[in-house]
Image (tube, grey):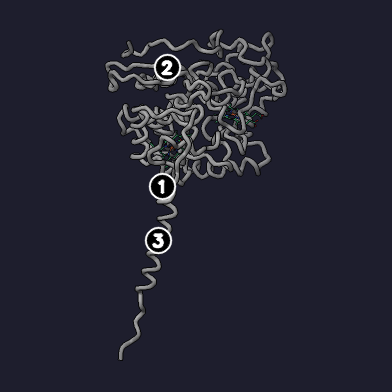
Amino acid sequence: MTTPRANYLYPALGLTLIMASIIFVVVLVPRWTFRPPEPRDLRDYTAQELRGREIYKREGCWYCHSMVSRPQDWDHGRRSRSSDYFYDAYHLLGSERSGPDLANIGGKFPDQYHMLHHKNPRYVKPGSIMPRYDYLPEQDLTDLTAYLQSLGPYGTRALDVEGGKDRYAATGETRWAYVRDYTWVGGPLDGVTEKVAFWKLDVAHQRALNEQLYGEHPEVPFKYSAEIEELMYGSSHEAANAKGALQGLATPVFPNKEALEEARLKDPEARAWTENSFREGQITDKNRLLANYGKGLFNNQCAPCHGVTGNGKGQAAFSMTKRPANFTEDKYAGFTVDAWYWRISRGVPGTQMPRWEYTLDANQRLTLAAFLRYVAQNKGLGKLEGVPADYGKAPAPPETTHPGAK
Ligand code: HEC
Ligand code: HEC
């Protein structure tokens, strides 16, 4: 007697059919029918940008970054259109957002930021979980940067709809978006003439960058170090960070009151800050010194968002939905030091304003509070040191200072 056997033939055929139709609908049909309109405001990639794109693919950046800004996204910039992909032979949309969407990343940061960020994301974003790519040759990192800078409406590939010209070449207004022809000589790109953005010129000077960045601000303790890495990853800070935003919403009490008191105790003058005026003419030399110290920190940590002068117009600001605060507004003149200190420590939940209590110590946050009080009461940088008189004016077209340039 034979036992009845299950017949797998039909289920197998059925499954294969289902699989095939899914592939047909999801892969083949779009492939045959997707013909995005040719964009009038976007140029093709340059050779360098294409190299960067290959590296982006090869290194698996797309495992963590998507490249499509959807209608329901906020803080990812302009929403993507099909024509944005006209020049993409294969797409790199990605399906996961462990990191931010990069469809509009071009022009958001200066090149230096990207180079440092690629080498070690913790250089510019303490606590970032993005892997470091410092094993890549300098040229690869440069190409990758060129590719990223080419994306989106502020990227180097953006064209003026009217004249078909590079979008920013005509105005040259924005510091981070000045496009010009540039011939590389003597370097790895010898003889190649490319359109590069103003901010790209500096990429060649990368090796000197770290020293320059931190050399300019010797008072800034933020030289990225093993200790900081340990602080961010080897301790409860990590857990605290994850819960940060929620705690910020839920805890009404003053954070770190003890730390603030301790920082103030060391400094009798700081104790009386809330009463003291920081207006020019009334501010004491000591307080001016502290505000200056805070300014150094501010340049390094806060200026990318809040702008060097504290007016809220930093390089990174324009792509944010919730814009960074402008400290020269009237309402801030009355802020007490405590209020500044509290805000800086806690950040602003629901915005990109970080919680600085994790990365800056009490003294540093106190000097930042002094700086902001100065800016708020004097409506700008006033007579603090080290600000060139013409700061904020549109830059002249860049000189060809690159060592290899003709
Ligand atoms: C393990 C996931 C992961 C991988 C892989 C990864 N990233 Fe990231 N990336 C992140 C996270 C998380 C952030 C947000 C924190 C930060 O800015 O470092 C980020 C941020 C960024 C930013 C800044 C975006 C912004 O708007 O602030 C850029 C640019 C970027 N990544 C580029 C890359 C490139 C290029 C690669 C490949 C070489 C890459 N990432 C690979 C996780 C990743
Ligand atoms: C990633 C961008 C970013 C960085 C970096 C940043 N901020 Fe902010 N900041 C914001 C945003 C966004 C807001 C929210 C503005 C609002 O709520 O109106 C904000 C708000 C603030 C406020 C609150 C203003 C208010 O109305 O209460 C203070 C104070 C402040 N920032 C100080 C700083 C200081 C000091 C630093 C540097 C140590 C810094 N920020 C760095 C983005 C940033």
Of badges 1 and 3, the one in the foreground is 1
363 left or right of 335 in image: left
Residue for badge 2: 180
Q: Give percent across and percent down for residue 82.
A: 49, 39
What distance separates the C-alpha of mark 1 from that of mark 3? Answer: 19 Å
Three-letter amino acid code at disc 1? Trp
Mark drawn on residue 75: none
Residue for badge 1: 32
Figure quadrant of residue 4:
bottom left
Name the foreground residue: 362 vs 343.
Answer: 343
Mark drawn on residue 19: 3
Q: Is residue 118 visible?
A: yes
Vertically, is 44 above or below 26? above
- At mark 1, the secondary structure is helix
Three-letter amino acid code at disc 3? Met
Q: Decide: marks 1, 3 in contact (CB < 8 A)?
A: no
- At mark 2, the secondary structure is strand
Q: Give percent across and percent down for residue 179.
A: 45, 19
Q: Give percent across and percent down for residue 390.
A: 55, 9
- Name which residue lies at 44% across and 48% down: 30
Q: Is residue 227 visible?
A: no
Quadrant into which the N terminus falls? bottom left
